Amino acid sequence: MNIREMVEVLNGKILVQNHDPDEELPRGGAADLMSDVLAFGSEGMVLLTGLTNPQVVRTAEMAGINVIVFVRDKTPPPETLELARDSCISLIRTGYTMYEACGRLYQAGLPGRGPVRIENNSW
């Protein structure tokens, strides 16, 4: 799935466009905990989140994420938009909840990361 198709599926609005709309997205993921993004994110994936602060862009940059989708029609503050422009990260907004946005993207063919295994369960 490319960025243009993703925006259509999500009935989204591009807030910051730093990438070719025909650029392919290898997979998607969703998180509001930036520690999860760092632990389980992967290069080139699209991140869906309800957080709009600049830390989301900084975390995405460290994880190699090029596209962030804000769910529930959230609009990031100006400093987040500016940081995304400077960091070459595209920002998109959708009115869907995180759950529905993820479902729509998965149904349209965008794969997720796959199961996460935690090896040491000492509880």
Image (cartoon, rainbow, N blue to C red):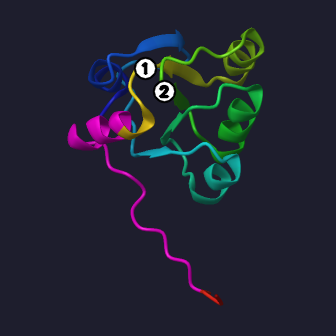
Identified at 62% across, 50% down, the residue is 37
Residue 109 included in the magenta stretch of the image: yes
- Secondary structure of residue under mark 2: loop
Q: Identify the amino acid type marked 1.
A: Thr
Which picture quadrant has residue 49?
top right
Residue 110 included in the magenta stretch of the image: yes
Identified at 65% across, 38% down, the residue is 60
Q: Is 54 on the left-hand or right-hand side of 7?
A: right
The answer to the question of whether label 2 and label 1 lie on touching residues, with beta carbons closer than 8 A, is yes
Q: Is residue 15 depicted above or below 72 in this figure?
A: above
Prevalent SS, magenta region:
loop
Q: Identify the amino acid type marked 2.
A: Val
Identified at 51% across, 41% down, the residue is 44
Picture coordinates of residue 12 (x, y %)? 39, 16
The magenta segment is: 100-119
Q: Is residue 1 depicted above or below 75 in this figure?
A: below
What residue is disc 2 on? Answer: 71
Please name whichever residue, 1 or 117, is drawn nearer the observer in this view of the structure: 117
- Secondary structure of residue under mark 1: loop
Say whether disc 2 or disc 1 marks the residue closer to the N-terminus.
2
Picture coordinates of residue 52 (x, y %)? 66, 25
What residue is disc 1 on? Answer: 94
Neighbour tally class for label 1: few under 14, some 14-19, many 20 plus, Cα within 10 Å: many
Q: Quadrant of the N terminus?
A: top left
Picture coordinates of residue 95 (x, y %)? 41, 19
Distance from Cα at disc 2 to Cα at disc 1: 5 Å
Q: Quadrant of the C terminus?
A: bottom right
Picture coordinates of residue 54 (x, y %)? 75, 26
Q: Is residue 21 depicted above or below 24 in this figure?
A: above
Identified at 49% across, 17% down, the residue is 73
